Amino acid sequence: MIRFATVGTSPITDNVIEVIHEHPGATFVGTVSRDAERGARFTAEHGGERAFPTVEQAASAPDIDAVYLGSPNACHAEQALACIAAGKHVLIEKPVCACAREAREVFSASRAAGVVALEAMRPLHDPAFARAHELFSELGPIRRACIRFGKYSSRYDDILGGRPSNIFDCGLASGALMDIGVYCIEPALALFGKPRVIAASAALLDPSTRPLTHGPIDGAGDALLSYDGFTASVHWSKITQDFASTQIEGERATLTLDSISIPTAARIDYRGNAGRQDAKYSAAGVAERTERIELPHVANSMCYELSDFLGAVEAVREGGDIESAPCGPLGTLGQLQDLSITALELMDEIRRQIGVTFPADAA
């Protein structure tokens, strides 16, 4: 039985605690909050035993085996290192750290300590994502992909109303890329590997908001990833609503996913025979045959990342090599850690190109 403490009281922590309760190999002990009353209330509401005033106290508790970090991105590295130093396994909400340098430090420390450190990146553990990847065999040579995720945030309304928000704050290593763009970048890397070249652009929040955001910060953005023989674009936004789908185009067929973060349905459109067109109007993009595919899904897909995390912990407890511990459909713990680092390397470069900097960049 893996006994968890959690850090953070946001809805994402609610979701994690829900799947902890549902898993027979895990139990929730309590949450960390600087506000003692809030922490006690949150812990009690979620069926825990006691709250913790600091991460260090949770990490040093003998009845805690693992800590879930749902804190702001800028806090992840310091908190993860404190837990690792105390011999605790850590499940860290995406993105795993504020920058690639911090991620390398966290994963290096976890390997040295013999504990599991895993980024909680839902789609990479979801059987639906793995099934969608299997469908690539139907597409023929892939030539173009468009991966997108845009969701208007109420936190943007806070900024427009003159109120600070931890979602748009350079000091907390946030912004649209870090909060929602990572759901595009990391799956793209998992599907296609590291690109040869990346070119990015972004819609930054109005300069008048910078007393609240503590520097230039992105509300929406795009990046073009160049590969040998094909190209992929990724699009993210927290200041508009994106109604388009993710699409992967092959020479033989095109795969469309209803969502990149929580895919539940897919469609394959087979192109049919090509024909010449004259100058008259003709409908474009008509498929010869369409196949609709329902992907496996559950009410709370965080159950998959929790299950893979617990599986890796069990493998390490049994004496297995930490980097080769099985960790879901994409491979081993070491492979997933490498993917997390590569994603942050790309995001560091995107931020450099669009002019968004965090305190961690100066270290």
Image (spheres, grey):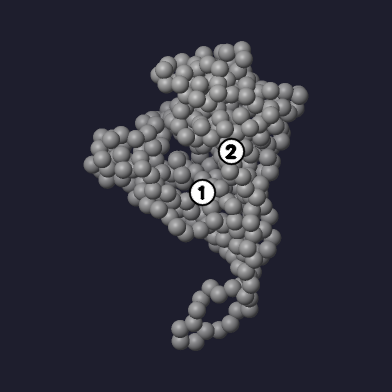
Other-residue count near label 1 (Cα within 10 Å), few / some / many at <14 / 14–19 / ≥20 = many
* Tag shown at residue 302: 2
Q: Residue at x 57, y 60 (%)?
A: 256
Asked whether the viewer can see residue 108, the reply is: no
**Under tag 1, what secondary structure?**
helix
Between circles 1 and 2, the one closer to the viewer is 2
Percent x, y of residue 2 = 65, 23
Q: Is residue 133 above or below residue 60?
A: below
Q: Which mark is residue 89?
A: none
Residue 37 figure quarter: top left
**Residue for point 62% across, 69% down:** 290
Q: Is residue 38 left or right of residue 85?
A: left
Amino acid type at image mark 2: Met
Residue 288 drawn at (x, y percent): 62, 75
The vertical placement of 222 against 291, above or below, is above
Q: Is residue 331 visible?
A: yes
- For marks 1 and 2, the one nearer the N-term is 1
Q: In the picture, which quadrant includes the C terminus?
A: top left
Q: Nearer the viewer, residue 102 or 62?
A: 62
- Residue furthest out toward the left: 208
Picture layout, residue 274 above or below residue 235:
below
Which one is in front, 330 or 2?
Answer: 2
Residue 291 in which image quadrant? bottom right
Give the amino acid at mark 1: Cys
Residues marked 1 and 2 touching at CB (< 8 Å): no
Residue assigned mark 1: 184
Disc 2: CA contacts within 10 A as few (<14), some (14-19) or many (>=20): many
Q: CA distance from mark 1 to mark 2?
A: 17 Å
Expressed as whole percent of the image width and height from the top left, the position of residue 228 reads 58, 58
Residue ID at (64%, 53%): 295
| Foreground residue among 225 and 136 | 136
Secondary structure of the residue carrying tag 2 is helix
